[in-house]
Structures are given as structure tokens and as C-alpha cells.
């Protein structure tokens, strides 16, 4: 990943002028040391976070139910948060939470006993949720593939693991897993 000091942000050709809000789609031109891409390569970056914003369907709060192991989850957030716990009653309480935010709040409640292997499995759990979401909803499948080679970034100051931490220093694991899934889906389509 390129350090923010080595990045110059350029508007995409034909993009509307920046109105002072965060620019959702822009190009990154590496002007310093590049590790994942050749020096001087240009990438489109798609930032996402809020459900109502462009590309909000990437958010785990987006209202797309998923079915995993025969159980329907209202959102991928409900599924992800419930998997933090081995207790079926706790999982069900989270599954039936009224909103993704309620599910997230319950998932962060440490009065429930966190499963001991959570840190080792959380990325795989998230990937399973994303696979379900983007294969069970054809319109999402198409929208993910339509991002081409763009860098997908959950842009938020609220999370430096799943997101970019707001300043690009975060891990952006949600974006990374979405790009991994996009590559997998593209490979599957090439074989068919």
C-alpha cells in the first residue's frame, strides 16, 4: 500500500467538480514508491461507507438479506456480528435485531462471551458474508464486477481495521475482501 504522502489525488475526467464534500470517485497517481502496482500506474478508487451514498450497497448495513446454512440474515452485518458468539441464543438475538446498527451494538456487547477464535476467523466470516451477498443478489454481483480494477475503500474514521481509518492508514479489510471476491467472481465467469 502506498503511503498517503506519496499520493496525488486527481479528479476523473468528466467528473463533477468537488463540492467540498468527500470526493467519492477519483484517480490515484503513485508518485513515490509503489508496492502493489508499477510506479506511475493510475487507479480509480471507489470510496464507500454510508448506505445512502453512491456505492452504499458495499456497506454491510445495506438491506440485502443473505442465506447461509439455511438461515436468512437481514443483512451481512447481522450475520457477521452474530458469528462472534458460539451461543445459539445470542446469535438468534442478533439475527432478529431490528436494524444493522442494533446488530452491531449487540455484537460489540462484551457481556456476551466472544468466541475464543474470533480474531483468527473474522476475515473468513466476513468473506463468507460477502460471498453470499454478492452471489445471491444478481444486481450486486453485476455492480461489483462493473467496478473493474478500481481500488475499493471503506472510507471512515470509525474503523481502522475494516476501513481506511479516514486517512488511508487503516487496513481497509472490507475493501480488500471485496476486491478478492471480485477477482474470484471474474475467474469463475471466465471458466464458464
Image: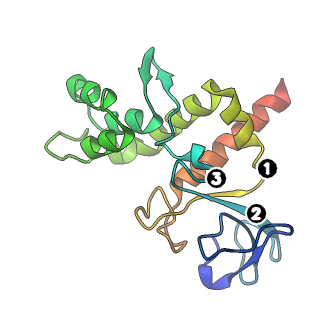
Dot 3 lies on which element?
A: loop
Q: Position of residue 41 (x, y in %)?
A: 82, 71
Which residue shows up at 76% across the image and 30% down it?
188
> Which labelled disc corresponds to residue 148?
1
Say whether marks 1 and 2 touch (CB < 8 Å): yes
Q: Tell me which label, 1 or 2, sits earlier in the chain.
A: 2
Q: Tell me which label, 3 or 1, sits earlier in the chain.
A: 3
Distance between the alpha carbons at the discs numbered 2 and 3: 15 Å
Q: Position of residue 21 (x, y in %)?
A: 59, 72
Q: Nearer the viewer, residue 26 or 40?
A: 26
- Residue 185 visible? The answer is yes
Residue at the far top: name it: 70
Q: Tell me which label, 2 or 3, sits earlier in the chain.
A: 2
Q: Nearer the viewer, residue 124 or 62?
A: 62
Q: Is residue 36 left or right of residue 68?
A: right
- Displayed quadrant of residue 40: bottom right
Within 10 Å of disc 1 (Cα), the crowding (few <14, some 14-19, many 20+) is few
Within 10 Å of disc 3 (Cα), the crowding (few <14, some 14-19, many 20+) is some
Q: Is residue 147 left or right of residue 173?
A: right
Which residue shows up at 80% across the image and 30% down it?
189
- Displayed quadrant of residue 146: top right
Distance between the alpha carbons at the discs numbered 1 and 2: 9 Å
Dot 1 lies on which element?
A: loop
Which residue shows up at 79% across the image and 49% down it?
148
Q: Position of residue 65 (x, y in %)?
A: 50, 27
Q: Is residue 112 left or right of residue 85?
A: left
- Residue 117 visible? The answer is no
Q: Is residue 12 above or below residue 183?
A: below
Task: Give the residue number, with chain letter if any, for mark 2.
Answer: 44
- Displayed quadrant of residue 101: top left
Residue at the far front: name it: 19
> Which labelled disc corresponds to residue 54?
3
Amino acid at each position: 500500500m502506498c503511503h498517503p504522502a506519496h499520493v496525488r489525488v486527481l479528479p476523473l475526467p468528466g467528473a463533477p467538480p468537488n463540492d467540498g464534500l468527500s470526493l467519492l470517485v477519483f484517480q490515484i497517481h503513485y508518485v513515490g514508491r509503489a508496492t502493489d502496482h508499477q510506479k506511475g500506474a493510475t487507479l480509480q478508487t471507489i470510496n464507500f461507507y454510508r448506505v445512502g451514498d453512491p456505492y452504499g450497497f458495499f456497506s454491510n448495513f445495506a438491506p440485502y438479506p443473505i442465506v447461509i446454512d439455511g438461515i436468512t440474515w437481514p443483512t451481512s452485518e447481522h450475520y457477521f456480528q452474530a458469528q462472534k458468539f458460539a451461543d445459539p441464543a445470542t446469535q438468534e438475538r442478533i439475527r432478529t435485531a431490528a436494524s444493522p446498527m442494533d446488530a452491531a451494538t449487540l455484537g460489540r456487547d462484551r457481556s456476551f462471551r466472544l468466541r475464543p477464535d474470533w480474531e483468527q476467523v473474522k476475515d473468513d466470516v466476513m468473506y463468507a458474508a460477502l460471498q453470499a451477498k454478492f452471489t445471491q443478489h444478481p444486481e450486486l454481483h453485476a455492480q461489483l464486477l462493473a467496478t473493474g480494477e478500481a481500488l475499493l475503500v471503506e472510507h471512515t474514521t470509525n474503523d481502522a481495521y475494516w476501513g481506511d481509518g479516514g486517512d488511508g492508514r487503516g487496513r481497509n479489510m472490507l475493501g480488500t475482501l471485496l476486491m478478492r471476491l471480485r477477482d474470484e467472481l471474474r475467474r469463475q465467469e471466465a471458466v464458464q
